[in-house]
Structure formats: structure tokens, C-alpha cells
Amino acid sequence: MSKYDVSSICNALMDILVEAEESDITKLGLNKGIMHLVDDARQNEVKSHFETKNTTQELGGSSLNAIRTLASLGANTAFAGMVGHDGYGTHIENRMNELGIDAHLLHSENADTGTCFILITPDGERTMNTNLGASCLFDESLVPMEAIANSKVFHFCGYQWGSPEQIQAIEKAVQIARDNNVIVSFDVADPFVVEHNREAFVAMIDKADIVFANRDEAKLLYQSSPEAACDEITKTGAIAVIKLGAEGALIGKGDQRIKVEPVATKVVDTTAAGDMFAAGFLYGFYNDRSLEDCGKIAATLASDVISRIGGVVSKKALDQVKIG
């Protein structure tokens, strides 16, 4: 029996969300809808631009978003990451304890906790400014080997390609998972990181059992349509989960293709939509539900989270999909 349903390694960040205008995106010189890696000075510049605006804060980091939602569904989860000795680090640790996540959090003496400052425009799109902070210092010596080996699923994302040390940690974790017959789940995460790490991601897909990508990421990976990307991923033996936004999703396994219908939703904020989709899919998957049911659970959680500001699924949606 596995001790954990899902374990993960990811950037442990504090998300700071603010409602922005299109003019703010222009003034700050940002590319709308993608993630920007920024240093301390640039992050402070972005924060200063919105110093008179109210903000919302929640645990951040793509895989941590998925893990906290799985924990809210009653999953046994484990998470490893690096934070600083500061208020944000304490907040992250306390919040994980509240959710019942087995937290393998290391505290750096040399860097502050990472932050992601998220600008949400009126169309619901989010533009992220990420300062990885202490997360960049997570290396292979810190990988929680026992937790990963005793999981049903090991889930990680492309945002871990932030430093050579993080990459080595993921490679070690994936090997531990494969050696112990643990399902390997890879969310490629964001067009920015795909564009800069395409060859490495394609190689990692060969080691994965489940691969999540959206339309833009799929195009960057294979220079092709979502359908063709799905075909390429399934050729490796993995289950392909291609998120298509308002058009739902496409799931592929072998020769099987399943169209997931979207859940009609007024888009307010797309923050963490893909992460919640992954959480819902994995929740159904390790509970032995059909791929079609996994897709429906995923779509329900994703549609709920985009209906309000902040990357948190409502209790109503959690209760709606809860199994058992």
C-alpha cells in the first residue's frame, strides 16, 4: 500500500494577485499571458507599480497548487520545496500544515521565499512575474526519496527548469519514481518555459506516464496542432492531456481519443486553471476512474477556479467531484 496518493517537488511560492488594466501590462513592458522570470529589483518594480491596489495572497507554485487542491479533496499528499526564513516562508509552512500536506520544506539561509506577482486583466488572463528566490537552491540532495517511492503518483512541472540544481533534482526524483513503479505525471507548465527547454521537455515526456499541456505549449513542443501533439505524446506510451481552454480538452491513450466538453463559465481569473485541471485528473486517475470521468472532474475544478479572483477551488466544486 502506498503511503501517499500524490507527491511532488515544485517551487514553493507565495502568489500575490492584483487586478490590472491592459495599460499596466503595456507600461511595465510585459508579454501578456505568460510567465516572466524576474530578479529582486524587477519584482520590487512591479510591486511598486501597484502599491495602492489591494492584493490577494495564496500558496503558489504550479504543482503546489495541484497538491493543495488534492489535499482539500482528502488525498494523502507530500510536497518538497525550499523557502526562506521570512514571513512568506512561515505562511507557506503553516498553510500546508492546515491542509494536512506532508511538508518537506527546507529553509534557506541565503535567499528569501519566492514570490509570483500575478496581474489579472479584465479578460481574466493572468500575466505572471516570478522571482524564484530560495526555490532555485533546491537540489538533488534534498529529494524526499522515501516519500516519492511510497506514492501512487509523482507529479511535477516544467517550472522546475529554473536552475541546473532543480533540473538534477527532478531527474533524480523521476528515476526514483520509475524504479518503484510510481506513476510519473509531467505538466509542461507554460509557453515561456517550453520555448526555452523544448528538447529537454520532449526527452522528459519519454519518461512520463501522464503529460499535461495546453494548446500553445503543445504547438511549441511539436510545431503542430493539439491533435498531432496528442499523437506524438501517446506514441511514447504516455497518456496525453491537452487542455483547450473554452473548447474543453483532448485526452489520448494509445489509439483512444476522448473529447472533454468544457463547463460553461464566465472567466474572471485564469490563475491556476491548468493546475486545478491536473489535480482533478489525477484525483480521478488514482481512484481508478475512467479517463472520461477524470476529464470531467478536471474540467469541473478548472471551470470553478476561473470564476473568481484567486487560485482556490470552492467547497461546492470540491464536494461535487469528491469520490466516496
Image: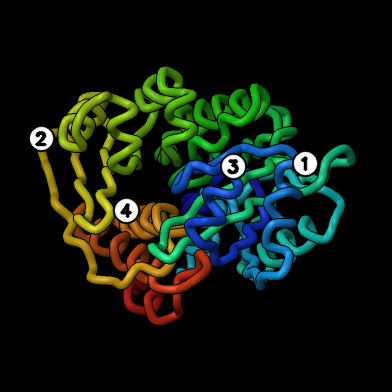
- Of residue 310 and residue 34, the one placed in the foreground of this image is 34
What residue sits 71% from the left and 69% below the top? 52
Say which residue label 2 marks. 255
Secondary structure beneath dot 1 equals: helix
Say which residue label 3 marks. 9
For marks 1 and 2, the one nearer the N-term is: 1
What residue sits 41% from the left and 22% below the top? 198
56 sits to left or right of 206? right
What residue sits 49% from the left and 64% below the top? 69
- Of residue 142 and residue 115, the one placed in the foreground of this image is 115
Q: Residues within 10 Å of mark 1 (few under 14, many from 20)?
A: few
Residue depth check, mark 4 versus mark 1: number of the one nearer the observer:
1
Q: Position of residue 112 (x, y in %)?
A: 81, 46
What residue sits 17% from the left and 60% below the top? 261
Q: CA distance from mark 4 to mark 2?
A: 19 Å
Q: Which kind of residue does numbered mark 1 sit on?
A: Ala
Secondary structure beneath dot 4 equals: helix
Secondary structure beneath dot 2 equals: loop
